[in-house]
Amino acid sequence: MNKLWQIVANVVLYGFLAWLLYDSIVVEFDPWFAVVVGFVVVLALGISLIPSLHASKVSPGAYPYED
C-alpha cells in the first residue's frame, strides 16, 4: 500500500511539473522558468532511472565510513 501512495504522489508531482512547463511555454511564454522546470524534470527523471545515483544502505545519522 505504501508503494501505491508513492506512485500516486509521483504522478501528481510530475503532472504538476508538466503543467508548469506547458504554462511557461505555451500559455505565457517565460523561457527562464521553462528552463528551470525542465531542468528539475530531467534531474528527477535521471535520479529515478539511474540506480547508481540512489543512496544504498545509509541510515540517517550514521556515518557510512570508518575513520
Image (cartoon, rainbow, N blue to C red):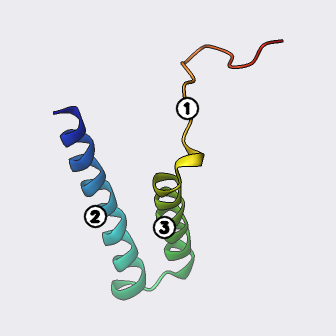
Going from the N terminus, do you reach mark 2 or mark 1 first? 2
Say what secondary structure mark 2 lies in. helix
Q: Among all residues in the image, which is located at the extreme left?
A: 1
Q: Mark 3: few, some, or many residues within 10 Å (few <14, many ≥20)?
A: some
Horizontal side of residue 67 vs 11, given as left or right = right
Query: Which label sits in the foreground, 2 or 1?
Result: 1
Going from the N terminus, do you reach mark 3 or mark 1 first? 3
Amino acid type at circle 3 is Val
Horizontal side of residue 18 vs 47, given as left or right = left
**What residue is drawn where x is 68% and y is 16%?**
63
Disc 3 and disc 2 in contact, CB within 8 angstroms? no
Going from the N terminus, do you reach mark 3 or mark 2 first? 2
**What residue is drawn where x is 62% and y is 13%?**
62
Which quadrant of the view contains residue 60? top right
Q: Mark 2: few, some, or many residues within 10 Å (few <14, many ≥20)?
A: few
Q: Mark 1: few, some, or many residues within 10 Å (few <14, many ≥20)?
A: few
List the residue tagged with mark 3: 37
CA gap, disc 2 and disc 1: 28 Å
Q: Which mark is residue 15?
A: 2
**What residue is drawn where x is 59% and y is 47%?**
52
List the residue tagged with mark 1: 56
Amino acid type at circle 2 is Gly
